[in-house]
């Protein structure tokens, strides 16, 4: 007699890919809206506070509806707190980068976390990267050099170049801490239920932004939008991020992420197109070519048979 499977029914491959592409575009739109908000005097801390707060409320309602217990296994509380702090840092660094450099470049550098995750896992006793992985990493680095137009930036000097360097550094910092967060999730919090982990992580992010705002670490971090455009952008990023995060949270068991997760790398491409269309952030031909090389190599790096 056949044994009933406890695995959720997976969605058809085409539908799952379409949903993931939609989510990637929503996350891309969230970053474009964030840039509009920053350009209209909205504080970085305020955007993260609103984004995480509204999403937290929706997620709490979903968890309550599913009647998920909030208890944590023994020995995981410290790791859960660290995960939340890392995600808060990643959000702050990435949004700060988006405020300084073209959004597509910020996302491109931020999406290099798979390389850092492989290196982190190896340094902590994990498997050694294969030759294929090392070659793909090299391709990604070459693509980044083209996309970021590094030779031209090194040849130029001035305040604009310093602004660019800070933005790239913040985006790379976001990639580093996100890689650390993923490692903790896989190796230290695997026993924690996904709904509980997501809810507690967002709670730490929200509280961290409140503390940072109250402490005055970023004097203009909680600045309100200066005009209606800023308010519309703030509302848009909250809706786009909240919708994408919640839909991903609800649908992920049926999306076969092991096979379909590389579709999420559509986000930098969507960001590039939206940034060019809405923000007039056009990149040169070599930069676009470099961006395409990076995205394709990351897809190959993260693809699992």
Image (cartoon, rainbow, N blue to C red):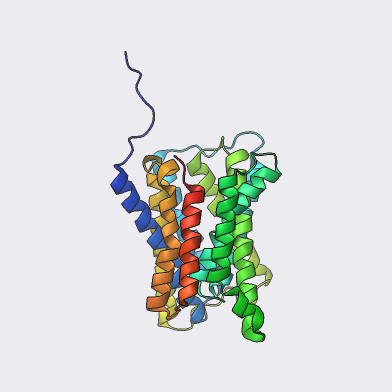
In the rendered view, tell whether residue 194 sits above or below residue 226.
above
- State which quadrant residue 189 falls in: top right
In the rendered view, tell whether residue 186 sits above or below residue 3.
below
156 horizontally vs 229: left or right: right
Q: Residue at x 52, y 81 (%)?
A: 41
Residue 64 appears anywhere in the view? no
How many numbered circles does the render carry? 0
Q: Residue at x 40, y 81 (%)?
A: 228
In the rendered view, tell whether residue 14 sits above or below residue 265.
above
125 horizontally vs 66: left or right: right
Task: Locate the N terminus and report the quarter of the image it occupies.
Answer: top left
216 horizontally vs 40: left or right: right
- State which quadrant residue 33 falls in: bottom left
Q: Nearer the viewer, residue 93 or 82?
A: 93
Q: Percent x, y for residue 21? A: 36, 56
Task: Locate the C terminus and report the quarter of the image it occupies.
Answer: top left
* Identity of the residue furthest to the bottom in this view: 158
Q: Percent x, y for residue 237? A: 43, 67
Q: Percent x, y for residue 215? A: 68, 69
Q: Nearer the viewer, residue 236 or 295?
A: 295
Residue 149 appears anywhere in the view? yes
Q: Residue at x 46, y 68 (%)?
A: 289
Q: Percent x, y for residue 221? A: 60, 73
Q: Residue at x 38, y 62 (%)?
A: 25
211 horizontally vs 236: left or right: right
Q: Nearer the viewer, residue 201 or 10?
A: 10
């Amino acid at each position: 007699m056949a044994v009933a499977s406890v695995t959720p029914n997976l969605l058809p491959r085409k539908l799952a890919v379409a949903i993931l592409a939609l989510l990637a575009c929503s996350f891309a739109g969230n970053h474009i809206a964030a840039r509009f908000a920053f350009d209209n005097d909205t504080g970085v801390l305020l955007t993260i506070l609103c984004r995480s707060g509204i999403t937290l409320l929706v997620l709490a309602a979903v968890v309550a509806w599913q009647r998920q217990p909030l208890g944590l296994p023994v020995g995981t509380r410290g790791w859960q707190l660290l995960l939340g702090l890392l995600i808060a840092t990643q959000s702050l660094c990435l949004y700060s980068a988006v405020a300084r450099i073209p959004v597509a470049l910020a996302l491109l550098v931020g999406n290099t976390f798979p390389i850092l995750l492989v290196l982190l896992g190896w340094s902590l006793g994990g498997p050694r990267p294969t030759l294929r992985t090392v070659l793909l990493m090299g391709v990604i680095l070459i693509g980044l050099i083209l996309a970021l137009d590094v030779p031209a930036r090194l040849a130029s000097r001035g305040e604009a170049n310093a602004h660019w360097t800070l933005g790239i550094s913040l985006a790379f910092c976001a990639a580093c801490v996100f890689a650390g967060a993923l490692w903790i999730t896989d190796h230290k919090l695997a026993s924690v239920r996904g709904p509980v982990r997501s809810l507690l992580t967002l709670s730490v992010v929200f509280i961290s932004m409140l503390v940072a705002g109250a402490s005055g670490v970023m004097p203009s971090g909680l600045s309100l939008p200066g005009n209606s455009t800023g308010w519309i952008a703030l509302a848009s990023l909250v809706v786009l991020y909240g919708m994408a995060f919640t839909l991903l949270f609800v649908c992920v068991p049926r999306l076969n992420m092991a096979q379909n997760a590389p579709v999420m790398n559509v986000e930098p491409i969507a960001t590039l197109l939206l940034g060019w269309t809405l923000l007039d952030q056009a990149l040169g031909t070599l930069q676009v070519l470099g961006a395409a090389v990076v995205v394709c190599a990351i897809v190959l790096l993260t693809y699992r048979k």
